[in-house]
Image (spheres, rainbow, N blue to C red):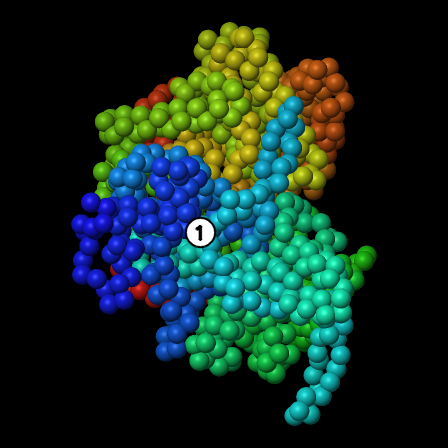
Amino acid sequence: AIASDSGASAPSPIALTNVRTGLGADAIATALIENLYCLLGKLPQHATRNDWYMCLAYTVRDRMMERYVATLASITETNTAAKAVAYLSAEFLTGPHLGNSLVNLGIWQAVEEALSRVGQDDLSSLLDQEEEPGLGNGGLGRLAACYMDSLATLNVPAIGYGIRYEFGIFDQAIRDGWQVELTDKWLRFGNPWEIVRSEITFDVKLGGRTEPYYDEAGRYRMRWLSEKVVKGVAYDTPVPGYRVPTTNLLRLWKAEAAESFDFEAFNVGDYYRAVDEKIASETISKVLYPNDEPEAGKQLRLAQQYFFVSCSLQDMIRLLIMRGKPLDEFHSYWAAQLNDTHPSIAVAELMRLLVDEHAMEWDQAWAITQQTCGYTNHTLLAEALERWPLPLFARLLPRHLEIIYEINRRFLNDIRLRYPGDDQLLQRLSLIDEAGGKHMRMAHLASVGSHAINGVAALHTELLKQTLLSDFHRVAPEKFFNVTNGVTPRRWIALSNPNLSALITRKIGDRWLADLEHELEHLEPLAIDGDFQKEWQAIKADNKRVLAGLIKERTGIIIEPHSLFDIQVKRLHEYKRQHLNVLYLVTLFNKLRRVSSAAEIPRTVIFGGKAAPGYRMAKLIIKLINSVAAAINQDPVVSQVLKVVFLPDFNVKTSHHVYPAADLSEQISTAGKEASGTGNMKFAMNGALTIGTLDGANVEIRDAVGHENFFLFGLTAAEVERLKAEAYTPRSIYDSNAELREAIDLISSGFFSNGDRGLFQSLVESLITRDDYMLLADYQAYVECQQRVSQAYSDQNAWTRMSILNCARVGRFSSDRSIREYCRDIWNVRPIVPDER
Ligand code: F58
């Protein structure tokens, strides 16, 4: 039975389909056995679970190859006019590939059937085998992955260019309440999703000096005599669109020693130097920086950025030449998007490649560079802006420094002519910060070198124009755009919440996954349908039981699935205010110890997220959460109605079980600080209600779902600024609010730290004396808002109606909508296959 493919049509001329790559259960079953034997050298009776996972992964990958080759052809073959997107990003937090590929290829059921034919009945245990590529820190890296999914789904040819880190974001363990970091050895068992392209390699120069010379035509030129060269090798991962022919690719660069070096050393007999050289070269792609606040002085980080940008731009030029197009049409065939400033050295590198390596005139090269590049800003936080000390920059990239000086000279000359006499303006706009030790301002380089600059939510873009980039907005307002972030419904609904997905499809048909913006709203009338509400509730209840099981397994804590699941998952940061949530929990704890808890709505408050290893306050907040959790969970009375969990090692894989199980989504950052947020969208899509501030995309989510279906509290961004300007005194709030004081004092007293009054002192001090993130100012409003939440939850039908409406009205936060906007406003690219939606 295994040998014949029942659903097979006539073989294609080169027999790429059918038994080899057919999508029916028979063909898949045959391929599983074949791959197990040929690629893993195993017979079914000896295969481990991981063997089955590996051979399934290869079997699925095989099924993407035909589309992948065809899509690649559209950007490599001559006579095709398609412009392609190069999404340049230091991070791609893709999450596990297997489940997503099954969803997008539409072969979930066929694979389940095929597995059962070969005696494997548990697809979910195979999905569990996959080690996720943690090649990102958080929102920014995950956004890049959602955008890759949408680009393919919209049939827009694209390459995601980045770094193949050997170690991704660290794994988090919790010991004695503290975060402990463990190295992420994600490649330990191999990676069946990538294809190494050993023939696609580029040399990347580093260090050394520059030297003028005259070329054959007698022109004065510059050359870069580098100190060393590393080689970048391409590793490709196919990115299948959802049920469309397009399969794009993620091309990640691994650093290796350039051959010239080890041969040279070997020939002079210095074998060990050759090995040292190899090790030093490979460190460039060794590890992802887990910093939330990029530290200046990290030369290796700048080397990583330059390394992947240089390889990517050289590859883009190679592909253009392969297509038989002249270099002066580069911008007609490539749109390069800079995902934050991490790839902003691309501006100088593209200039160098065009001018130094390809002898193009400066003005033409500059026009091409600007028309090619777009810059997305993801943060307004001053401490997160990339600035490189000039000496460090000069040491690593001497030629780029010269190029940037020339860009700056021309840019400031132009400004000087347009705004005569305004020296302050020149200083503020300059690519070089002259104050103190001189620094290169990467956001300025990206802004000057791009034709488009965008923020990631409406409020964020407005603030960007008014604050961080106000001078750029003044001199070039036409460059500014907003593209509110979005997330892919394929991973964040279909894959992670299959039961909800099936229910939605049963009611409104199956077009919503490819057109969330227009289709999901058809759920709206069902919000008041009693039967539908029951089904909706049953699915939420199931999802909560699954999460409860996972929590028990990982933490030993037993939680009540009927309680309100109140969840805050995101990186740990003071501006995200996990500790505001804790202040509320301590307040509730105090109250429940005093009065009868009979009337309290039972809650389970769940936290998850990693702290940057060097961020002491964030790590102390994790310790505080765990300490408060222990006290609450141990209290025989309070724990009847309140449980607190810190779920360790929050990552994409775990998050699949988290968003679908939430009743309440915590989006409580200080207004003006969270550029957009994307977890907020994932929660709402899965029917959670939000408690949140007017920050980032919360503003737009609230407008979309209806103000009456959103729990709003807190100061606005403008009020935060005003209060700060008026000399904010948190201590007076502490003095005047008895409940708040009681909560803070209990933390200070050592109650949560075995009598150690010192442990949380720095945290308490910072709140009472500075409170940079205005927790105390928002405390009372937050507590009262949480009371409204509890009250609302006590009416389950009303809550369910709001839950359905939240889901039905957030179609606009699909990353498909975001990508359509990028295509139209910024990239000027069109689908290769006409979009029939
Ligand atoms: C995030 N940035 C924003 N940075 O904080 C969030 O509001 C937004 O929704 C998201 O980008 C997508 O636009 C973010 O995740 C990082 O992780 C950087 C990585 C490199 C070091 C500095 C932080």
Q: Position of residue 308 (x, y in %)?
A: 59, 61
Q: Please say whether residue 705 is visible from this viewpoint.
A: no
Residue on which the image places disc 1 = 193
The quadrant in which the C terminus is found is: bottom left
The N terminus - image quarter: top left
Image coordinates for residue 477, horizontal then vertical, percent = 55, 64
Q: Residue at the spot x=22%, y=38% of the render? A: 506
Q: Where is residue 44 in the image (x, y as percent from the top left)?
A: 35, 40
Question: To which quarter of the image does residue 629 belong?
Answer: top right
Q: Can residue 259 be seen in this view?
A: yes
Q: Is residue 536 above or below residue 322?
A: above
Query: Vertical placement of 238 versus 573: above or below?
Result: below
* Identity, as a three-letter code, of the amino acid under mark 1: Trp
- Total numbered circles: 1
Rendered residue at 51%/67% (across/down): 199
The image shows residue 745, relative to residue 581, as above or below, that is above
Of residues 181 and 255, the one drawn nearer to the viewer in this rendering: 255
Question: Who's the residue at 39% across and 41% down the image?
Answer: 52
Which residue: 75% across, 19% down?
757
Disc 1 crowd, CA 10 A, few/some/many (<14, 14-19, 20+): many
Residue 161 or 463: which is nearer the viewer?
161
In the displayed structure, does residue 837 sit left or right of residue 55? left
Task: Judge by depth and name the residue closer to the eye, 141 or 582.
Answer: 141
> In terms of secondary structure, where does tag 1 sit?
loop
On the image, which quarter does residue 50 sit in? top left
Q: In this view, does 348 lie to the left or right of 638?
A: right
Q: Residue farthest to the bottom?
A: 217
Which of the 4 image quarters holds residue 740?
A: top right
